[in-house]
Amino acid sequence: MPIQKILVVDDSPTERYFLTDVLIKHGFSVSTAENGEEALQKIKADKPQLILMDIVMPGQNGFQVTRAISRDPTMVDVPIIICTSKGQETDRIWGLRQGARDYIVKPVDPQELLAKIAALG
């Protein structure tokens, strides 16, 4: 089943707007969360088909939230793509170890993002 519903988790209003704009223009249904706690609530209330996760956020960071999602039997089937400014290879490896399916370094290239979403769908 192709991915339609995407949750964008990022504490930056600019980044949330940019990602939401790109995704809506390509026919996706998008909801947003400003932090990990809000993301977990939204996932439980209305489960998305994909999560775009920032790492550096107040409260729980994206690695912690990704780990919580990938260890929860009710959410483990929701793929996560980490979208972060943390471009070190060690960060990428750590993110994938926490349960993320893919990793994109900001600034996000819309075509790269759409290709990665299509690869999961």
Image (tube, grey):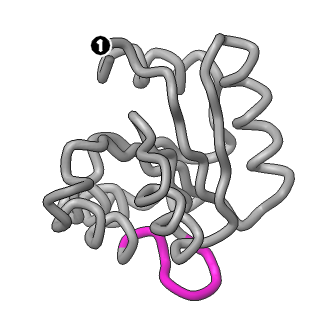
Q: Position of residue 8 (x, y in %)?
A: 60, 47
Image quadrant in which you'd find residue 102? top left
Between 40 and 97, the one lying in front of the other is 40
Image quadrant in which you'd find residue 50? top left
Who's the residue at 49% across and 83% down the image?
Answer: 60
> Which segment did they paint magenta?
56-63
Relative height, residue 57 to residue 117 (above, below): below
Which residue matches tag 1? Answer: 1
Looking at the image, residue 74 sits to the left or right of residue 85; the answer is left
Amino acid marked by disc 1 = Met
Q: Position of residue 33 (x, y in %)?
A: 65, 60
Q: Residues within 10 Å of mark 1 (few under 14, many from 20)?
A: few
> Is 108 covered by the magenta stretch?
no
Pick the quarter of the image with the N terminus: top left
Looking at the image, residue 35 sits to the left or right of residue 89; the answer is right
Pick the quarter of the image with the C terminus: top left
Who's the residue at 53% across and 49% down the image?
Answer: 83
Image quadrant in which you'd find residue 93? bottom left
Q: Position of residue 117 (x, y in %)?
A: 43, 23
Residue at disc 1, secondary structure: loop
